[in-house]
């Protein structure tokens, strides 16, 4: 039935064009307070806010001008979206993004984002940074309970925060109340 | 002449497609890119997100030697086909009979085999067709290379998860999604031998969360106008020169939609090729010969998290595919270069639908499990061969013959973290064929990371391939006979892989392997006759070592180096397989010349010497060099690229298959021949984003 194939192709082409027209023609979201964005674009902004609500020990910075280093370990899940926060000033320090891949040193960071791809080596990664004041962040399941500090959990299309306060305190990191207020505090698994 | 689709029609479609997009492109710019960094924490909690296509695992954690070829790498090196891109992976090499291209893996690329031992997926959707098991590596691949976000390559057996065909490698082509495009692009391309292509893509994520991406492309090329076959250098065969019989036309389209938990993938492609070899003693140098390959796939997916914690992921897919091939093969009434020209027509098509349900869960911190059920119903298989009027003799018609079949499958895979840095993986799949019973495919892997930067993998796996209807039932009585007692072939593979990362820029993967293939399905010739048939006579063993180095620096300098050596032998005869080089090497570099906008990318590929049983020749080792220059984001939205392939115009040849012969009545002999490959060619692309 080549005719059916042709009809089907035409139909799908039309659907494609219609879809294309609809997506671009749709006006700005009616409910402006609910914009829709890419998950990682939003997580990037969360990370910027984590930096704002976190105090690191002064000795973790080589000089008063040195930046807050955000390391991304594992897959580069952010791509270009991380550029929206790179270079922003927090506590008078610039936020510097380092993509660590798999070979970079996670101990050189102030904030370590562990991509979900690294689930299997999570224990190794957390152990590597455990004594240091490194704020560990991830969107992987079970991250906070496993010893990570801030877990971003997607639920019903929104991001929820789970914070393992004990882990942060052990590392000598202070998380301010503004952050704790909107998060769920979880107990680390023993 | 075959009736080819009119390029004008495609141009018209492209034009109607572009206009509405251009008109509304401006509106698209503002969507979803408000400055979120100004929002407070409380506001952020109100933002709705759409699913990002995050990869679940880093490739170093995949239980196999796994590689990724990115869109950037395809673009910078100007790969024209899927096969060309895959040739950069250690142990992989490409051959062409100028009708289809064939991907060799680990010294295995039998002439006459349609890539049946490689499982090719598009966004996880099976692309090997049901009738021939063919995986298209050339222009027949249904998705234009411009629309590929990345290619995931896993070497070794994959049947424990994927079932049929996954003997040597699983290649998963990931198409671009709405978030990868964020706008439109139109591209025009021209090159040697009247090569012309038009390409249009568009994609974005709409305000309502709908992610859309799609592309359309049309290609027309005359091909090499002078191909010299030295074995056919006789007056009867135009002194071995095939003139103007290498044309190609291809039309492709894909559409990818995602909305909330639903996804849709549609691909459609039609490729027409004139095959210069005129195989099966066809009329040499006849411009009326052609083959057409058409594929259509439609798949709908639904995925959801069943448990609130994000644990318990359910994935389902439902699909319908069609594949059709037909060709005109003119031949001369009397053997050799005499008599009337008769057009032999060959046709094959299949239709199938299928579904899959997969459930992944992590019941405990240290254990994750995946279980799945799959069903595939190939409800129509047709093969026909006949001579066109006035001869009208039908040699084959399987319309009434029930070549249809169904496969019910189930699989399970578990991953258990024995220690913080040791993971054990075990998987098993069962495929139940309605035609010849069941197949079990197990695999096991041990992953050990002594350091964060080092991973060792010890792997074992089994895989199989069921004989297809073409191999079992193609019987025209004069060129090929069927073999309905043909059984499945299977493979066992052992592998040790070491992965080492240096800094955030360099990855080294080294592996040693052995595979043993049993009951290999082989095209054989009946002794003293030209009749070909498929049989299960052979045992094959391959031992080899592979090395792949990939590096990407922050300043945009990147490169790769791949080396491999393989000893792939037929254990029954003790001889090295046809088209099986001992040594393969490839290397490429992409250098930023100016402001990350201008890149120069040289590349060299080496294929060691290969045997050709058909001609009895040992084909010399070949080195080909390619050079690409790409200029991106000129004036904001223009991309320009210029590529030269086979820069030094090296002559090189691919071993011919059993069907590559002509009868010469002057000498009363059959002239077998190998296949000359392209000389130096160039290509130029200009694209504009909107």
Image (spheres, coloured by chain):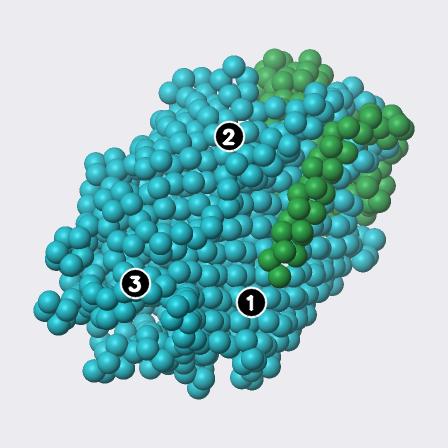
* Side of B682 relative to B441 (left or right): left
Determine whether the residue tagged by mark 3 lies in a helix, strand or loop.
strand
Chain of the residue on which disc 2 is drawn: B
Q: Chain of mark 1?
A: B
The quarter holding residue B369 reads bottom right
Chain designation of label 3: B
The mark nearer the N terminus, 3 or 1, is 3
User: Is label 1 in contact with label 2 (beta carbons under 8 Å)?
Assistant: no
> Label 3 crowding class (10 Å Cα cut-off): few <14, some 14-19, many 20+?
some
Residue in the picture at 56% in, 39% down = B9
Tell me if residue B565 can be seen.
no
Quadrant housing residue B284:
bottom left
Residue depicted at x 27% and y 65%: B340
Is any atom of residue B669 visible in this view?
A: yes
Q: CA distance from mark 1 to mark 2?
A: 33 Å
Residue B475 location, quadrant: bottom left
Which corner quadrant holds the C terminus of chain B?
Answer: top right
Chain A rendering hue? green
- Single out the mark in the foreground, 3 or 2: 3
- Chain letter matching colour cyan: B
Nearer to the camera, B275 or B63: B275
Closer-to-camera residue (A58/B556)? B556
Residue in the picture at 52% in, 56% down: B294
Say which residue label 1 marks. B350
Q: Nearer the viewer, residue A76 or A148?
A: A76
Q: Nearer the viewer, mark 3 or mark 1?
A: 3
Q: Which residue is mark 2?
A: B187
Q: Would you place residue B520 above or below residue A63 in this image?
A: below
Q: Is residue B513 above or below residue A38?
A: below
Is residue B609 depicted above or below B627 in this figure? below
Residue annotated with mark 3: B341
């Amino acid at each position: 039935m080549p005719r059916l194939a042709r009809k089907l192709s035409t139909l799908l082409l039309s659907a494609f064009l219609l879809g294309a027209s609809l997506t671009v023609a749709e006006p700005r979201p009616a409910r402006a307070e609910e914009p829709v964005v890419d998950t990682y674009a939003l997580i990037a902004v969360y990370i910027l806010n984590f930096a704002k609500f976190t105090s690191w020990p002064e000795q973790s910075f080589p000089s008063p001008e040195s930046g807050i280093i955000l390391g991304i370990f594992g897959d580069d899940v952010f791509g270009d979206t991380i550029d929206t926060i790179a270079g922003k000033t927090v506590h008078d320090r610039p936020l510097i993004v380092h993509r660590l891949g798999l070979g970079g040193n996670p101990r050189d960071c102030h904030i370590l984002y562990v991509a979900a791809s690294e689930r299997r080596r999570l224990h190794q990664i957390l152990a590597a940074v455990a004594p240091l004041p490194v704020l560990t962040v991830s969107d992987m399941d079970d991250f906070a309970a496993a010893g990570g500090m801030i877990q971003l959990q997607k639920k019903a299309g929104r991001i929820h925060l789970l914070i393992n306060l004990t882990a942060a305190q052990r590392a000598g990191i202070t998380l301010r109340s503004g952050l704790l207020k909107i998060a769920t505090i979880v107990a680390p698994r023993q | 002449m075959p009736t080819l689709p009119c390029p004008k029609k495609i141009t018209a479609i492209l034009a109607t497609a572009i206009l509405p997009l251009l008109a509304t492109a401006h509106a698209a710019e503002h969507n979803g890119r408000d400055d979120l960094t100004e929002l407070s924490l409380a506001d952020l909690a109100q933002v709705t997100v759409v699913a990002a296509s995050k990869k679940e695992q880093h490739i170093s954690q995949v239980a196999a030697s796994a590689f990724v070829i990115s869109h950037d790498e395809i673009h910078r090196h100007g790969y024209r086909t899927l096969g060309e891109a895959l040739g950069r992976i250690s142990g992989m090499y490409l051959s062409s009979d100028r009708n289809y291209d064939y991907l060799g893996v680990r010294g295995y690329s039998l002439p006459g085999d349609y890539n049946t031992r490689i499982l090719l997926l598009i966004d996880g959707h099976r692309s090997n067709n049901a009738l021939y098991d063919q995986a298209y590596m050339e222009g027949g691949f249904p998705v234009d290379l411009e629309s590929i976000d990345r290619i995931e390559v896993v070497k070794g057996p994959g049947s424990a998860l994927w079932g049929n065909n996954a003997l040597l490698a699983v290649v998963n082509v990931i198409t671009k999604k709405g978030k990868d495009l964020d706008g439109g692009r139109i591209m025009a391309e021209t090159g040697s031998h009247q090569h012309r292509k038009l390409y249009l893509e568009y994609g974005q994520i709409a305000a309502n969360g709908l992610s859309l991406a799609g592309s359309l492309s049309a290609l027309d090329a005359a091909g090499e106008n002078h191909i010299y076959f030295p074995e056919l250098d006789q007056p009867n065969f135009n002194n071995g020169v095939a003139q103007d019989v290498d044309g190609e036309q291809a039309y492709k389209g894909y559409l990818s939609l995602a909305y909330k938990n639903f996804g849709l993938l549609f691909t459609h492609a039609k490729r027409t090729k004139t095959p210069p070899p005129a195989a099966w003693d066809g009329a040499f140098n006849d411009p009326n010969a052609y083959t057409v390959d058409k594929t259509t796939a439609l798949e709908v997916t639904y995925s959801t998290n069943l448990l609130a914690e994000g644990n318990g992921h359910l994935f389902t897919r439902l699909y319908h595919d069609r594949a059709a091939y037909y060709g005109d093969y003119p031949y001369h009434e009397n053997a050799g270069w005499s008599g009337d020209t008769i057009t032999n027509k060959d046709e094959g098509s299949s239709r199938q639908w299928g579904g899959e349900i997969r459930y992944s869960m992590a019941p405990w911190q240290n254990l994750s499990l995946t279980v799945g059920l799959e069903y595939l119903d190939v409800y129509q298989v047709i093969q026909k061969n006949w001579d066109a009027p006035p001869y009208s003799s039908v040699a084959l018609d399987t319309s009434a013959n029930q070549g249809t079949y169904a496969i019910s499958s189930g699989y399970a895979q578990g991953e258990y973290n024995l220690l913080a840095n040791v993971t054990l993986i075990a998987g098993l799949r069962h495929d139940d064929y309605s035609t010849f019973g069941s197949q079990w495919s197990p695999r096991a892997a041990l992953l050990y990371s002594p350091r964060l930067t080092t991973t060792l993998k010890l792997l074992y796996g089994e895989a199989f391939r069921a004989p297809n209807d073409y191999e079992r039932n193609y019987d025209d009585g004069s060129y090929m006979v069927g073999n309905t007692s043909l059984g499945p072939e299977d493979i066992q593979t052992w592998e040790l892989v070491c992965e080492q990362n240096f800094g955030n820029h360099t990855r080294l993967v080294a592996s040693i392997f052995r595979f043993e293939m049993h009951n290999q399905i082989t095209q054989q010739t009946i002794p003293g006759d030209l009749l070909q048939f498929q049989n299960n006579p052979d045992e094959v063993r391959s031992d080899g070592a592979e090395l792949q180095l990939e590096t990407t620096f922050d300043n945009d300098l990147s490169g790769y180096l791949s080396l491999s050596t393989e000893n792939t032998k037929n254990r029954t005869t003790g001889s090295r397989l046809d088209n099986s080089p001992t040594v393969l090497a490839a290397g490429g570099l992409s250098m930023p010349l100016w402001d990350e906008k201008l890149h120069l990318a040289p590349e060299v590929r080496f294929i060691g010497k290969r045997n050709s049983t058909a001609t009895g020749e040992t084909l010399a080792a070949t080195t080909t060099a390619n050079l690409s220059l790409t200029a991106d984001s000129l004036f904001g939205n223009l991309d320009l690229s210029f590529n030269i392939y086979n820069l030094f115009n090296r002559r090189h040849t691919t071993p011919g298959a059993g069907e590559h012969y002509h009868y010469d009545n002057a000498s009363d002999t059959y002239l077998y021949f190998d296949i000359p490959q392209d000389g130096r060619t160039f290509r130029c692309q200009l694209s504009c984003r909107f």
